[in-house]
Image (spheres, rainbow, N blue to C red):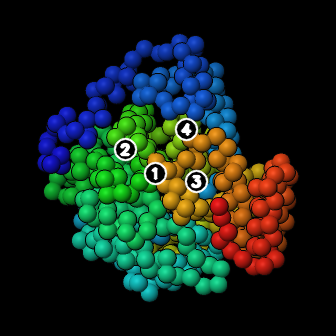
Amino acid sequence: MCSLVGNQRNCPTASFLDEGLLTDLLNGPQADATRLREIIAKSLALQALTVAETAALLRADATELIEEIFDAARMLKRKVYGNRIVLFAPLYVGNLCVNDCAYCAFKRSNPHAVRRTLTEAEIRSQVQALEDRGHKRLILVFGEHREYSPQFMADCVRAVYAVKSGHAEIRRVNINASPLDVEGFRIVKSAGIGTYQIFQETYHRQTYATLHPPGTPKADYLWRLTAMDRAMEAGVDDVGIGALFGLYDWRFEVLALVAHARHLQDRFGVGPHTISFPRLQPACGVQLDHSRQVSDADFQRLVAILRLAVPYTGLICTARESAEIRRQVLGFGVSQIDAGSRIEIGGYTESGDTQVVEREQFTLGDIRPLEEVVRELLETGYVPSWCTACYRMGRTGEHFMEFAVPGFIKRFCTPNALTTLAEYLADYAGPATIATGENLLQSELDRIPDSPEKAQLVERLRRIRVEGERDLYI
Ligand code: SAM
Ligand code: SF4
């Protein structure tokens, strides 16, 4: 098994990550402006970039070229994703953990951590609170512990889907948890999960070894690196990869993410559904090494370069980042954000408006309520979307054609986003949000040329507003 092999070069599924090659590419000569513009043009033609091409973008340091990268990322974002932003919330189920990750407040050696696992009744009340605010998409987060078996996680997912009252329901449950074996992934898949998300933390093997003590399950770098292969073998075809930025050189991590994405694409015919790029945040009981801290300017660059490198992959920016940073990166790459998030266990019913740091994995940067985020999105011309249509229509994995098929966004994504927005406005929004939202909805409708599809959309909106129907999607 790969996980027992000390040298990743002996592991067929891990051979995509050749550290020496990535480092050489990053230390190579600067590409000239003409070559860089060719690479940018390739990306704008919606072709994924190679690792070498991504490295050329990462090496660019002339202000003018960096600006061109930002401009291109903005253009590509508009072209591929339009102005929709998908919204979700995390639900931390339990923070028992056998690992000792140097950066995480849930690490087993942290005496300050208050350990807790939600009971099924508590999951129900957290979900109810989330639904009452208007959420439709959740990601369940777990520490690594024998209590959090695949069956346990599957039961949690089913418990979440079962919480329905009136118009309130969760329509897509994703998971962020430790790597499983193929059978484990099959078990969680059978509960109807959307995406299974695992971050490699750092792709740099030596750094990984210093942060994850030997003897802990997470010390097995290759088991983690190959997890998404096993997930895909098990039929989980929406997988989310990520790196925790601030542990090692951010440029290396970007290249490694691109190498990982290309590997999945080559091996399974489908790349990752999403890429996440959390930045290391202060955490209770954790001494952080700040030597690899990623500045705001570099953070923006990495988002823009990722946008260009993987045009078809959703990019997630979580509430770890401040509202201001999130505003900036929405413009040139990010397609999904969480909002109204609480990451202390039980936080959606128990913590009010304050953060209880002893119970959190790290400190959040943006704790605005969902409606405030929604209103700001609307005011700045974005369409907040709670759409779950593709996953529920079986348009996942290689069937997820969102970006490959010309006209897909116009045909499916925009109408579905607008109907979920109409639901939110009808069920959860206050008067100011309703006014801004209805204006935006109308201007979005005005931009759609008359057609049978538009007439059907108008009819679905009427059924939502007048008949009180919900969950109308195509
Ligand atoms: N226990 C599982 C694991 O380690 O994969 C999943 C849950 S873990 C709570 C989710 C992610 O939080 C980790 O993969 C890591 O990237 C991130 N994280 C941990 N400590 C963090 C910190 N101090 N700042 C920002 N993100 C952090
Ligand atoms: Fe446990 Fe995950 Fe935190 Fe590591 S990152 S200590 S595995 S919860």
Residue 261 screen position, x and y as percent = 41, 40
Instruction: Please identify, in this view, whether the residue under mark 2 or under mark 3 is nearer the observer.
Output: 2
- Depicted 218 relative to depicted 119: above or below: above
Residue 183 screen position, x and y as percent = 25, 63
Question: At label 2, which amino acid type do we have?
Answer: Phe
Instruction: Please identify, in this view, whether the residue under mark 1 or under mark 3 is nearer the observer.
Output: 1
Residue count near mark 1 (Cα–Cα under 10 Å), binned few <14, some 14–19, many ≥20: many
Q: Is residue 313 found left or right of 247 in the rendered image?
A: right
Tell me, for residue 397, which label it has, or none: 1
Residue 88 screen position, x and y as percent = 56, 63
Disc on the earlier residue, 3 or 4:
4
* Gap in angstroms between the C-alphas marked 3 and 4: 14 Å
Instruction: Please identify, in this view, whether the residue under mark 3 or under mark 4 is nearer the observer.
Output: 4
Residue carrying label 3 = 336
* Gap in angstroms between the C-alphas marked 4 and 2: 18 Å
Q: Is residue 406 found left or right of 150 in the rendered image?
A: right
* Gap in angstroms between the C-alphas marked 1 and 4: 15 Å
